[in-house]
Amino acid sequence: QVQLVESGGGLVQAGGSLRLSCAASGRTVSNMHMGWFRQAPGKEREFVAVIVWNTNNTNYSDSVKGRFTISKDNAKNTVYLQMNSLKPEDTAVYYCAASGVSAATTSNVYDYWGQGTQVTVSS
């Protein structure tokens, strides 16, 4: 089984930055498409970013493009989400996810999920 554990969430003022981490076990992140999703209260889970396992190509939602950066450290088996210029609308629970077959933006292709970490951006 693959286990994903997110960390790094917390409270931040608008315009600030946070870096989320996703530590994986049971399988190397180098062989999985690794994604970040988020879910705000009362809203559906939303795609944020993904990094493709074999090419390290990245894809971002329009709402975070230019502000967020997904990266990974294969040696540490960890995926990161650097979040800059945070806005109150970024407030959500952020989830790390892993897929062995697809780097699509839909949550259904991801087989493994972390427990989530809360990000709250104050105005």
Image: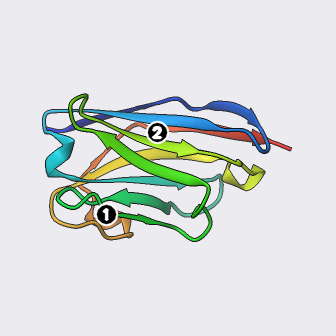
Q: Is 45 above or below relative to 6?
A: below
Q: In which quadrant of the rendered view does residue 14 lie? A: top right
Where, quadrant-wise, is the N terminus in this rendering?
top left
Q: Write the residue at 52% across / 68% down.
A: 61
The image shows residue 15 at horizontal and vertical percentages of 77, 44
The answer to whether residue 39 is left or right of residue 80 is right
Q: Which residue is mark 1?
A: 57
How crowded is the residue under tag 2: few (<14 C-alpha within 10 Å), some, or many (20+)? Answer: many
Labelled pair 2, 1 in contact (Cβ < 8 Å) = no
The image shows residue 108 at horizontal and vertical percentages of 31, 66
Tag 2, which secondary structure?
loop
Q: Which residue is mark 2?
A: 116
Q: Write the residue at 65% across / 58% down.
A: 42
Give the CA distance from mark 2 to mark 1. Answer: 24 Å
Q: Write the residue at 73% across / 39% down.
A: 16
The answer to whether residue 116 is left or right of residue 4 is right
Please state which of the two labelled residues, at mark 2 or mark 1, is closer to the viewer: 1
Q: In which quadrant of the rendered view does residue 80 lie? A: top left
Q: Write the residue at 26% across / 65% down.
A: 109
Q: Is 67 above or below relative to 122?
A: below
Which residue type carries mark 2?
Gly
Q: Is 53 above or below relative to 79?
A: below
Tag 1, which secondary structure?
loop
Q: Is 119 above or below relative to 106?
A: above
Which residue type carries mark 1?
Asn
